[in-house]
Image (spheres, helix red, strand yellow):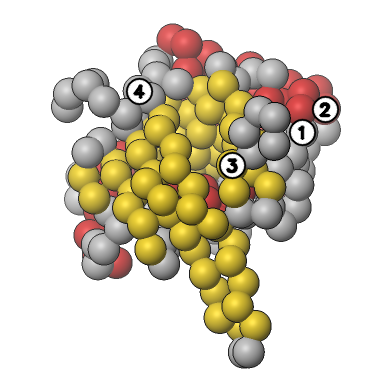
Amino acid sequence: MSKEGPVIELRDVWKIYQMGEVTVEAVRGISLKVNHGEFLSVMGPSGSGKSTCMHMIGCLDLPTRGTILLEGKDISHMSESELAQVRGRTIGFIFQQFNLIPTLTALENVMLPMAFQGIPLNERRSKAFSLLNLVGLSDRMYHRPKELSGGQQQRVAIARSLTNDPRVILADEPTGNVDSTTGKSIMDYLSKLNKEEKKTIVMVTHDPELAKYASRVVNIYDGKIKQKGD
């Protein structure tokens, strides 16, 4: 895959919700480029549109109008099955709520995304073992989420996000449900992925301390990017 041009580009993207008689413009004409290997922080208060923007970048939602390019490919009008394939191959997700399946062990949670990509069972298991070892959970592989601390669950989520060797990692308030010490270790690890593995990271946060880890910060207010001097 060529590294020329941005890995993600939004061109005049809008997301409009109709809630009864009320029209809500969650994202209003955002244009943004994210370069390969960049660590971008998207900041803004609650309700600013930053998470909506991230969901569209991550192929979890489609824009009402405008264009979203992922590695030069227009994802704005793809079908759900096409979006699912793009998500599986290109993007890893880290959510504030972890989104682990409670009935599965840590190992099984990490293996799951690879099943959707048709990877053989032995290969899925081997890679999940390696990733959980990488995030320091080799002794917790057979524990279910309720048997893990918040920090351990988030590390399982990070391991899961890396299963299909994604080029882009999207992190939505990745330290929101962990203590400050664990949060620092998680951010240090994301920084390492960016610097050593050259992963492109887009992180949504309202915390200026987390934003310091990023190489660039974009501020969103009322569904629009706030420019200097606004």
Decide: is 163 above or below 108. above
Q: Could you tell me how many numbered marks the image carries?
A: 4
Q: Residues within 10 Å of mark 4 (few under 14, many from 20)?
A: many
Decide: is 16 above or below 199. below
Residue depicted at 75% across the width and 52% down the height: 46
Q: Is residue 131 left or right of residue 89?
A: right
Residue depicted at 54% across the width and 57% down the height: 28
Q: Secondary structure at mark 2?
A: helix
Circle 1 residue: 207
Circle 2 residue: 180
Say which quarter of the image contains residue 81: bottom left
Q: Amino acid at mark 2?
A: Ser
Circle 4 residue: 36
Circle 3 residue: 225
* Along the line of sight, the residue nearer the viewer: 85 or 207: 207
**Front tag of 3 and 4:** 3
Q: CA distance from mark 3 to mark 1?
A: 17 Å
Estimate the x, y position of residue 98 in percent, counting from the top left. Answer: 62, 48
Quarter occupied by the N terminus? top left
Q: Secondary structure at mark 4?
A: loop
Q: Secondary structure at mark 1?
A: loop
Quarter occupied by the C terminus? top right
Residue depicted at 49% across the width and 63% down the height: 15
- Mark 3 vs mark 1: which is more N-terminal? 1
Residue depicted at 44% across the width and 38% down the height: 32
